Amino acid sequence: MTTTNRTELLDELSWRGLLHQATDEAGLRKHLAESPRRVYAGFDPTADSLTIGNLVPIMALRHFRRAGHEPVVVMGGGTGLIGDPSGKSAERQLQTAEQVEANVNSQRRIFERLLGFEGVDGGAAGGATIVNNAEWLGKLGYLEVLRDIGKHFSVNVMIQRDSVRDRLHGREQGISYTEFSYAILQSYDFLHLFRERGVTVQLGGSDQWGNIVAGVDLVRRVAREEVFGLTAPLVTKADGGKFGKTESGAIWLTAERTSPYAYYQFWLNADDADMPRFLRLFTEMPLEEIEALEAEHAKNAAARPAHRALARHATALLHGEREMERAEAAAAALFTGDVASLDEATLAEVFAGAPSSEHGKAELAGEGVALVDLLPLTSLAKSKREAREFLSGGAVTVNGKKADLETRLTTGDLLHGRVALLRRGKKHWHATRWG
């Protein structure tokens, strides 16, 4: 991993598209250049994993670390009990303390992978720390919050924030005092981290701008010191669609939610128009390499060099080199039809979301089952007549081998003794499972 010069960090964040706003960019630039700083970003545990949109601030933290600064990840074990109204049109469903704690423990693995932590509240490993704001927010008394923190907040200012104003103007859905108070608690996080850990910079998504500014103001009012805030943009696709959403749902940062293969495919199938931006945002490749890939892609778009580089880098970053290579091999096998080369675990992962059907293995005894009879029982043909047309036209394969009207499926055709993979054309797969 290349190292970023501290004086050039904001420039790099800018050309990568990771810098949206800063409370005082000139002051922040000087502050970061003078000496190593501690910079924090907060993540509320609303689920047991994070979606791919959270990768943007995490990538920014990685660049801070490369420049010699210390990232501090704040897990919202305390604020997660309240719920952030930012970007929400309705009140969040409150989670139990047990749910929040379980989500914190689950999400921690993501940060350990991407930023190299030793553990919650542990010492820095390679210049990184992770803490849980339940540790200090849980000790705050209500009177203490009102007297020592609340007096520094103007309700007039708070209700002008988009996240609050939009909800106040809604006829049916207002905003509870609980969510209205969220900004106060997040601001206190910054004050606590400044006092106890010397954190002087807060990073977040652009939807967090109001909360970040409030935190900067609170530190200035209470501690009489200057701290800084900056935001990364919320990413959308070139066509205006929501980033990180597919037909099958959200893309997550844990293998249990989104397999390494599905993650690899997400990047591999990104739109050409998104490539320049995604290469800058989601890899740590130098600008010269990115521009060289773009030039290569312009000459031979069919080879998809930029897509392959993005998929390799992004998958290796999150899941490691071995899982990236497995995903790449699986993608190649599907492209060529050589699915018989895949090991059982990879096969199960790749076809986990594919159309499938269950059958009794006894049907394969003797001469087996005629494919023309089997196809109408799958998603590949609606009738026996349609099955004949596909088979006579050479459109069907079994485990990558061309099939015809005479093809019969036997136990010898089963991959790993259980699965036969049927394909019609280039894209339509169906997994038949025999037990």
Image (cartoon, rainbow, N blue to C red):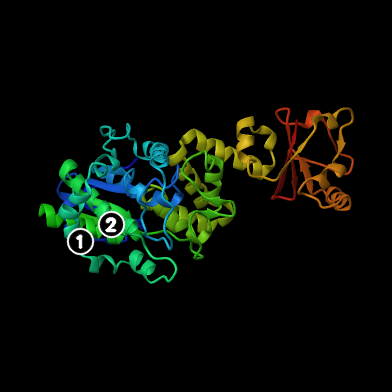
Residue shown at 14% from the left, 49% from the top: 34
Classify the position of the C terminus by image quarter: top right
Name the mark on residue 16. none
Instruction: State left or right for residue 67 relative to residue 148.
Output: right
Number of on-image labels: 2
- Regarding residue 393, the answer to whether it shows in the image is yes
Residue underneath mark 1: 153
Nearer-N-terminus badge (2/1): 1
Q: In which quarter of the image is residue 430?
A: top right
Residue 243 x, y percent position in the rendering:
48, 57
Q: Is mark 1 on a helix, strand or loop?
A: loop
Amino acid type, callout 1:
Phe
CA–CA distance in space, label 2 to label 1: 10 Å
Residue underneath mark 2: 183
Q: Quadrant of residue 206?
A: bottom left
- Regarding residue 226, the answer to whether it shows in the image is no
Up-down relation of residue 219 to residue 338 (above or below) = below
CB under 8 Å between discs 2 and 1: yes
Who is closer to the viewer here, 136 or 283? 136
Amino acid type, callout 2:
Ala
Q: Is mark 2 on a helix, strand or loop?
A: helix
